[in-house]
Amino acid sequence: MSEANSYERYSRQIILPGFGKEGQQKLFAAKVFVVGAGGLGCPVLQYLAATGVGSIGIADDDLVALNNLHRQILYSVKDIGLSKAERAADILRQLNAEITITPYNKKITTQNALALFEPFDIIIDGTDNFAARYLINDACVLLKKPLVYGAISQFEGQVAVFKNENERDVSYRDLFPNPPKDGEVANCAEAGVLGVLPGIIGTMMANETIKMITGIGTSLANQLLTYNASTNEVYQFSLPGRTTHSHSPKTKAEFLTTDYEWLCSSAATDEEIDADTFRDLIEKGDVDVIDVREPHELPKANEFSNIKIPLSQLPRNYIEIRSDSVVTFCQTGSRSLQAVKILKGIFGTEKKVYSLRGGILEWQRRVK
């Protein structure tokens, strides 16, 4: 592309006071790595590519699914079943052919994170699970790479910037010192999410990245911004200084041996049963099936008899459980594992308690 055409493409931001050609050149020279090409990653990637960030890396090992499309508007129905990372890269190249976009169709792990992040200036966390968030944070702290963080659930989202330049800068672990276990915090598949919310939060994340690169405006460094799409309430908090955390790796060698899945997992996974075993238990009878979801959650479980006791009420309402065998279920099998732990603490060995692996979504997929 000629210099004249390049100027025409970016002219509306080049003419901004304090931005200019210098700001555009900083964007061209920048290298940004985006982890996750889903709800948050899509708007981040679209705006970074459109604004002219020179080199963008995309890591995601997931495939496009129909239930992604209400919020991941980078994709269409023609993309279902294709790699998110590779498809996103193809679409973004059509948006802006003068930048470099490199897809990585892989999951970020302790074995590849440091090498993947090293060549880039800024890391953006668009993931949807705690194991990945702690892993990405710790890698950025060790590499002293700035991290732009975002998260969404139902109608609420949050954005923060962790600069990681020195020991005074806060990190994700200062925001959430103790990793939650599976099921303690519901993800989008469990709790749902308003389709426009990832677009709003993802655009904020892109904005913070652009400000960091160009030096314009006021950064959210060491701040947390929260937004409620239902009420339009916005709050901004100053985060406390960095502290020492017991699970935080101090060296790259420690990072390579840290098991992030274990830190954020439930100890009750050996009590899961699959759909076939669950069907056998139902057919034999003498089993109480407990739906630990909130009353408003869909889809409804009409295929079998069940008792509705939300997880938060289980310690008080367990008296409804009378059978010797108990199966708990939720959307995807995370909260039901927590329910198993609660019920085992109440009943001990008096009852056999199981969690339905994959939850009602997997069950309905299997029986249809």
Image: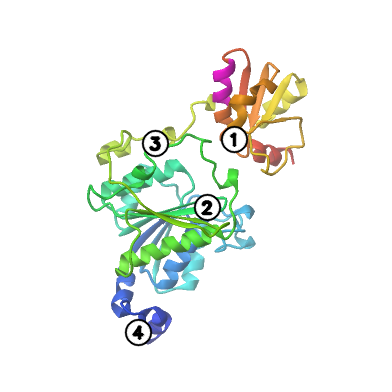
**Residue at 64% of width from left, 28% of height from top?**
328
Q: Earlier in the sequence, mark 2 or mark 4?
A: 4
Kind of residue sitting beneath label 2: Glu
Kind of residue sitting beneath label 4: Glu
Q: Name the residue under label 2.
A: 156
Residue 325 location, quadrant: top right
2 or 3: mark nearer the eye: 2
Q: Is mark 4 on a helix, strand or loop?
A: helix
Q: Quadrant of the C terminus?
A: top right
Q: Mark 1 points at which residue?
A: 333
- Tell me if residue 34 comes above or below residue 187 in the rendering: below
2 or 4: mark nearer the eye: 2
Could you tell me how many numbered marks the image carries? 4
CA distance for labels 1 and 2:
23 Å
Residue 83 in view: yes
Q: Earlier in the sequence, mark 1 or mark 3?
A: 3
Percent of width and height locating residue 232: 53, 60
Percent of width and height locating residue 43: 49, 63
CA distance for labels 1 and 4:
54 Å
Range of magenta residues: 340-347
CA distance for labels 3 and 4:
51 Å
Within-10-Å neighbours for mark 4: few <14, some 14–19, many 20+: few
Q: Which of marks 2 and 3 is nearer the N terminus?
A: 2
Q: What element carries label 3?
A: loop
Residue 18 forms part of the magenta stretch: no
